[in-house]
Amino acid sequence: MLDKVNFLTKKVKDKAGRLKYVYDGTITNGASISSLDRSKLITYEYYDNGARKSVLYPEFAKNGQTYRYEEVYDYYPDGTLNNLINRRVKVVNQGTPIVDAE
């Protein structure tokens, strides 16, 4: 599907109909989602109650290091949003993200 700025964007939903992955449709060449490089995807995770837990964005390089941006959601017991943390994480050891102190 072309998005509003004419980029080919693919969306994959989980069994509950929520976003699981979003990616640039030009990277697939007809490949299935399981064969794609996960570092190029936007990945969504959810708590058991269906609330969004996190969003992990594609990797990018800056000053010789590889990073990803991550959004982490925290909720009050009644389900309302308490905190939304946006952070840059450094990717080390085959894609393992760690929080960047910068």
Image (cartoon, grey):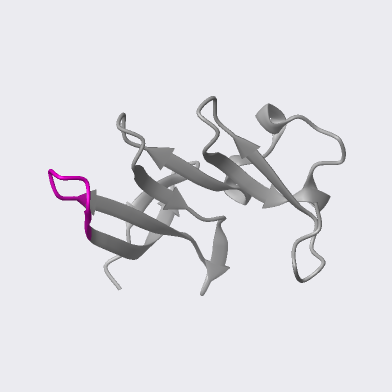
Near-viewer residue (33 or 7): 7
Give the x, y percent position of residue 29. 87, 41
Near-viewer residue (48 or 23): 48
Left or right of 54, for residue 16: right
Q: Most extreme residue toward the top, as rendered? A: 15
Give the x, y percent position of residue 69. 44, 61
Left or right of 26, for residue 58: left
Give the x, y percent position of residue 94. 50, 41
- Which residues fall within the magenta stretch? 75-82
Magenta stretch: helix, strand or loop mostly: loop
Q: Most extreme residue toward the left, as rendered? A: 77
Near-viewer residue (73 or 33): 73
The quadrant in which the C terminus is found is: bottom left
In the rendered image, the vertical position of residue 21 relative to residue 1, given as above or below: above
Q: Is residue 22 magenta?
A: no
Task: Tell me the residue at 22%/60% (across/down).
Answer: 83
Near-viewer residue (30 or 9): 9
Left or right of 86, for residue 55: right
| Residue 33, quarter of picture | top right
